[in-house]
Image (spheres, rainbow, N blue to C red):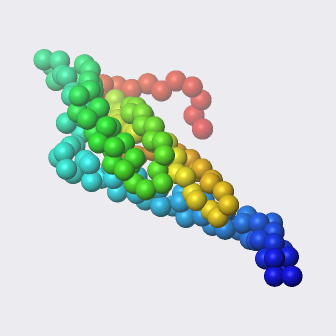
Amino acid sequence: MALILTLLMVRFFSNHLRPVVETVAVSEATNFISVTVAEVVEQCMQEQGLGYDDLMEIHQAQEGGITTVTGQTAAINQLKSQIVHTLVSIDSVGDVVAEVRNQFDSAGINQTHHQVLMDLSVTVHLFIPGEITSVTVDTTVCLAETILIGTVPNSYLQTGSIP
């Protein structure tokens, strides 16, 4: 009789409570990883003393205009490696994939908002009684940003319709 009661309780748990436990665990893991990624990136940036000028080099013409923006590949790769290594050392973290990219957006007449972004995909393994569930958290963090200012023309003509 005790065995039957135990089996019924296990079945009840599996059918009714496990989805709730799994949903809560996934939510907690997602929140934990999101916060942890931001903290790890900030910590690694501070430890290496990195800012925009350490990750990117702006080249200017003799007249003062910007000609190119060059990534400091060695510094970027070292930072990326440290972040991935730190995240992988956390219990239950399986895989970490990190990609660094640049984003340029218009910020006004001859002004460009430049961001150095890191896209991270972190897989965490959750050990729920009776099963292992994997959760992948995708997040993007800004490593550095600046406004690149070009020369302002004497006149500006906007083509197209006026709203």
Residue at (36, 42) in percent of width and height: 84
Whether 10 is drawn above or below 39: the answer is below
x and y, in percent, of residue 82 in the image: 29, 42
Question: In this orientation, which residue lies closer to the viewer: 31 or 127?
Answer: 127
Q: Residue furthest left?
A: 62
User: Within the image, what quadrant is residue 65 found in?
Assistant: top left
Q: Quadrant of the N terminus?
A: bottom right
Report the side of 152 relative to 18 (left or right). Answer: left
Residue at (52, 46) in percent of width and height: 123
Q: Quadrant of the C terminus?
A: top right
x and y, in percent, of residue 38 in the image: 38, 54
Can I make out residue 28 in this image?
yes
x and y, in percent, of residue 139 in the image: 49, 47
Can I make out residue 154 in this image?
no
Whether 79 is drawn above or below 46: the answer is above
Report the side of 4 relative to 17 (left or right). Answer: right
Report the side of 16 relative to 127 (left or right). Answer: right
User: Within the image, what quadrant is residue 91 found in?
Assistant: bottom left
x and y, in percent, of residue 154 in the image: 29, 25
Residue at (33, 53) in percent of width and height: 40
Question: In this orientation, which residue lies closer to the viewer: 1 or 105?
Answer: 1
Residue at (57, 34) in percent of width and height: 162
Number of marks: 0
Q: Residue furthest bottom?
A: 1
